[in-house]
């Protein structure tokens, strides 16, 4: 399984990196929308929406929201005003803080015969659309926006890898045994260190000065912490419906949502932190 995971990553990672670094922002937005909406499709399944027509209608509604944000943000010269993108990213941060509280209430919204499904469907929109807006906000920044988006995603990848290997070799204390039995406190620490290290290492290539590196490290640390919340929340959705993975599209990795759960939680935090500290 580890070999399969590595081979899949070696194929997909260069494609993702090339898209983030070289695609113009409008094209990047389109590609990200496809990826994130694919993850949202799987989110609907984990919310126990089995009917294909119902899931399709919900997906179109979220796509329409994305299109509306872009349309409302258009400037006369053809560019975009990122005010709505920024506002949406901030809403995403609030949502993930609430998601952290949700994790402490394992049984909340676990009964899909009641109103629980509505909460999870709303959560899907609050997770996916703000993350997409945050990606646009970062990538569209004239101050090295393309490499900064790569760093925002790479620090989550690195944190996942660091947590996996540290947890596998040194993990003893369970982080959240009921939600994700394989995650450990030691793995969390390894992920935090790996994510911060990668962000600080690549930041100078995106124009960060030496004086800005502590701010980059701080933002990366918080972003990785939020990515863990995103990962755990998806695990909670899976536990509620008895699913091992969100899908089977990616060999060795599961579904799309399994790969972007941490990214969608980290992007709004990184976008706001980048703007706050001005790097």
Image (spheres, rainbow, N blue to C red):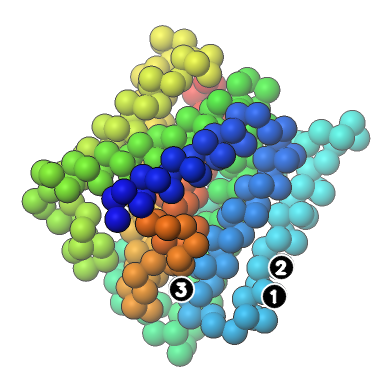
Q: Which structural element holds mark 3? A: helix
Spot occupied by residue 215 in the image (x, y as percentages of width and height): 40, 22
- 120 relative to 89 in the view: left or right: left
Most extreme residue toward the right is 76
Q: Is residue 99 visible?
A: no
Q: Residue at x 13, y 44 (%)?
A: 169
Picture quadrant of residue 192: top left
Q: Which structural element holds mark 1? A: helix
Q: Residue at x 58, y 61 (%)?
A: 38
Spot occupied by residue 18 in the image (x, y as percentages of width and height): 59, 33
Q: Residue at x 38, y 78 (%)?
A: 241
- Report if the CB atoms under discs 1 and 3 are less than 8 Å apart: no
Spot occupied by residue 248 in the image (x, y as percentages of width and height): 45, 66
Name the residue carrying label 1.
57
- 62 relative to 252 in the view: left or right: right
Q: Earlier in the sequence, mark 2 or mark 3?
A: 3
Q: Looking at the figure, which quarter contains the N terminus?
A: bottom left
- Report if the CB atoms under discs 2 and 1 are less than 8 Å apart: yes
Most extreme residue toward the left is 172
- 124 relative to 162 in the view: left or right: right
Q: Which structural element holds mark 2? A: helix
Q: Is residue 213 above or below residue 156?
A: above
Q: Is residue 152 above or below residue 92?
A: above
Q: Residue at x 44, y 40 (%)?
A: 10
Q: Residues within 10 Å of mark 2 (few under 14, many from 20)?
A: few
Name the residue carrying label 3.
46
Alpha carbon separation for disc pair 1 and 3? 16 Å
Q: Is residue 170 visible?
A: yes
Q: Is residue 222 above or below residue 110?
A: above
Spot occupied by residue 130 in the image (x, y as percentages of width and height): 58, 50
């Amino acid at each position: 399984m580890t070999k399969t995971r590595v081979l899949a990553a070696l194929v997909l990672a260069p494609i993702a990196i090339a898209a983030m670094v070289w695609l113009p922002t409008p094209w990047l937005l389109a590609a990200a929308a496809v990826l994130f909406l694919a993850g949202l499709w799987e989110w609907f399944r984990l919310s126990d929406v089995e009917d294909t027509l119902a899931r399709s209608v919900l997906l179109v509604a979220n796509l329409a929201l994305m299109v509306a944000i872009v349309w409302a943000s258009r400037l006369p010269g053809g560019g975009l005003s990122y005010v709505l993108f920024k506002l949406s990213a901030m809403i995403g941060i609030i949502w993930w803080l609430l998601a952290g509280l949700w994790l402490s209430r394992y049984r909340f919204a676990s009964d899909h015969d009641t109103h629980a499904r509505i909460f999870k469907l709303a959560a899907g929109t609050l997770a996916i659309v703000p993350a997409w807006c945050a990606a646009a906000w970062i990538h569209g920044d004239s101050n090295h926006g393309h490499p900064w988006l790569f760093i925002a995603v790479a620090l989550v990848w690195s944190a996942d890898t660091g947590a996996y290997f540290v947890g596998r070799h040194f993990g003893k204390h369970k982080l959240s045994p009921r939600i994700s039995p394989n995650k450990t406190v030691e793995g969390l620490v390894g992920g935090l260190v790996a994510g911060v290290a990668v962000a600080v290492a690549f930041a100078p290539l995106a124009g960060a000065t030496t004086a800005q590196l502590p701010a980059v490290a701080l933002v990366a640390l918080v972003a990785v912490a939020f990515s863990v919340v995103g990962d755990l929340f998806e695990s909670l959705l899976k536990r509620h419906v008895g699913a091992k993975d969100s899908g089977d599209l990616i060999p060795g990795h599961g579904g799309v949502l399994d790969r972007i759960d941490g990214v969608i939680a980290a992007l709004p935090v990184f976008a706001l932190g980048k703007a706050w500290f001005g790097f």
